[in-house]
Amino acid sequence: MLSDDLITLGYLEDGSSPTRAIERFQRHAQRNYRKTAAGDAVHEAPVYTGPVDGVAQQATLDEIARWLQLGYRLPLGYFKVAKVAAWGSLREDAAAAWLALMSRVNGLGGTIDGPYGDTRRPLMKTISVGASKFSFRICGRAVDLNQGLGNSRYHVVPEPRGERMWWRIFCKTAHGTSFDLTAEIERGGLFERIPAQPGWEQDGRKREWWHFQWVPEKQKTFQDECELIGITEKQLRAAGYQDADLDHVPG
């Protein structure tokens, strides 16, 4: 039966919606990430070109059968979580890129070393002011720079764009010069800054000048991002996330 196949693949749990399970499978079938029943991560060019509509059409059934034949499963924990020196952790690909960036910035006489305001953040039932319940920090894709350096090494310059406020950081070197740290972090397109949240003028926690996040292959839903680092649907629901939350865009 289809429901048994979805359970085997890891997409259908007790009480969850078969339609939603099918749609998640269809969406995942269009990605490169695969994981075997033995726990091996596999990078595969997608074969499925059918719709993402939650309907078990023939193309979907064929892809389910193919996954079962190849021993594929929901790619839960496709990426490991890795340490960023002694200052927290990120998804392993983001961590490796950040460590390389850290070395490059140090070579310029600047710093993006920790301690950080945040790196990977655990699931929380209570979300504080300025935080998002869909944050890339939860998914191991974001770093909050050391905000204390805003008074010593970092000079933060406003860059208004229409109704949104962005910030540019200049970093002082040991020689008394400074350079555009934001440009250096964004060089190569692997990390990006974000705009300030509405209300930043009244609440400094919403300024967000310190926040940089990993750009490559952003997922379409918050749950998709969480699963890639091993956070299960059961854990998300236990933290209070509902279907609409799980399907919300991350960030």
Image (tube, rainbow, N blue to C red):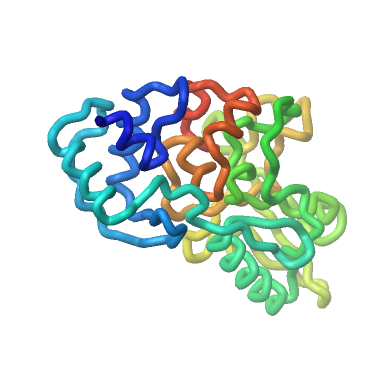
Up-down relation of residue 97 to residue 59 (above or below): below
Q: Quadrant of residue 196?
A: top right
Residue occupying the point 61% across, 63% down = 95
The quadrant of the rendering that contains the N terminus is top left
The quadrant of the rendering that contains the C terminus is top right
Up-down relation of residue 20 to residue 51 (above or below): above
| In this picture, residue 219 sits left or right of residue 139 | left
* Residue 248 coordinates in the image, percent (x, y): 48, 28
Residue occupying the point 68% across, 67% down = 179
| In this picture, residue 174 sits left or right of residue 85 | right
Q: How many marks?
A: 0
Up-down relation of residue 77 to residue 189 (above or below): above
Instruction: Using the image as rendered, state which of residue 146 and residue 19 is in the foreground.
Output: 19
| In this picture, residue 145 sits left or right of residue 162 | right
Q: Quadrant of residue 4?
A: top left
* Residue 28 coordinates in the image, percent (x, y): 34, 43
